[in-house]
Image: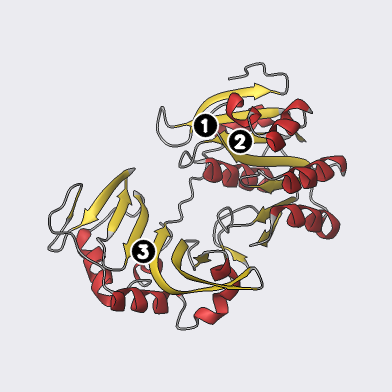
Amino acid sequence: MKNENELIRLFSINIRNRLKMLRLDLEKLQEIRMRVNEPMMLKYAGREYFVEDGRGMSRVSSRPYIVVQNEMRETMEYIGNYSLYAFEDEIRQGFITVQGGHRIGIAGKVIVEDGHIKSIKYISSINIRISHEIRGCANKVLNYISSGDYMYHTLIISPPGCGKTTLLRDVVRQLSNGGPKRRGMTIGVVDERSEIASCYMGIPQNDVGSRTDVLDCCPKDRGMIMLIRSMSPEILAVDEIGGMEEVDALRYAVNCGCKMIATVHGSSMDDIRRRYAINNLVEGKVFERYIILDKSMGVGSVAAIYDMEGCSLF
């Protein structure tokens, strides 16, 4: 964890003190969930816990700590530094990214005007996803997706929670910085949900490398084209592709000479072949490498690596 205070200061005084009493190993803390009039819960070391009304936390609790509305309001004031209006664009997408790269999902009453989401108010639920970087987690795959200065178009396939974004981030960092046997490459990241670089006021809070340019909170299809036209990237990186617009933009990028690194939800090659837009890329042999993640040996385990013909490399 970069700075424990960056996280603790986000909460109301009562909750802040309660979290301090838990003496958590913040490297194992993944999520903190708060819902008005409901128990406060943590995801810690891959398991879900209730925060106790007394001290400690437990898997099953008869006396959980209940979050009240004033605590939610106070917490949101700290999160927005008393200026939530400054985060209106992010709030419309259902989340706020704060200093340290922590991402706060929000739910409440959605305000719609002319068919478009204008804002969310009366916030009743928040989910703080703790930002973690695992430097070096891409070491085991780099030699499969690159050869010297040549980079293969790569698709990372992973179920939710298996570390695809963490792996993508470290791939970007290492390719951007370069190394003894690999020159650094200019990379463009389209970070639609602020999860790769975790930008705060436009500045990446996670290390994505010295030659990386980030478009934060930008739709992937438009962002890829914008970066090609403005920043001349050698590599483009995007998280969780899916729609036909994104596939078309990805093809455009490939035809412009950019190498692609992307992720998609799934647990196997068969999974992604069932999705028309993604199967279009598989059948067209756009991607030269497929990396499949699972949890068999812990989060971020590499289950398999295939080439464009479906031959196993790992």
Report the quarter where the N terminus lies: bottom left
Residue lying furthest bottom in this view?
82
Reading the image, the residue beneath label 3 is: 4
Q: Could you say whether the residue bearing mark 2 is in a helix, strand or loop?
A: strand
For this view, does 48 lie left or right of residue 310? left
Do tag 1 and tag 3 residues touch (Cβ < 8 Å)?
A: no
Residue 57, image quadrant? bottom left
Residue 19, image quadrant? bottom left
Q: In this view, does 42 lie above or below 183?
A: below
Q: How far apart are marks 2 and 3 (CA)?
A: 31 Å
Between residue 154 and residue 147, name the one nearer to us.
154
For this view, does 209 lie left or right of residue 10? right
In terms of sequence position, does the residue under pointer 1 or pointer 3 come before the other? 3
- The residue at the point 81 percent across, 45 percent down is 253
Q: Which amino acid does label 3 sit on?
A: Glu
Reading the image, the residue beneath label 1 is: 293
In terms of sequence position, does the residue under pointer 2 or pointer 3 come before the other? 3
How far across and down, in percent of the image, does residue 266 sit? 55, 34
Q: Which amino acid does label 2 sit on?
A: Ile
Reading the image, the residue beneath label 2 is: 156
Q: What residue type is labelled 1?
A: Leu
Q: Could you say whether the residue bearing mark 1 is in a helix, strand or loop?
A: strand
Q: Nearer the viewer, mark 2 or mark 3?
A: 2
- The residue at the point 60 percent across, 72 percent down is 89
Between residue 149 and residue 251, name the one nearer to us.
251
Q: In this view, does 146 lie above or below 186?
A: above
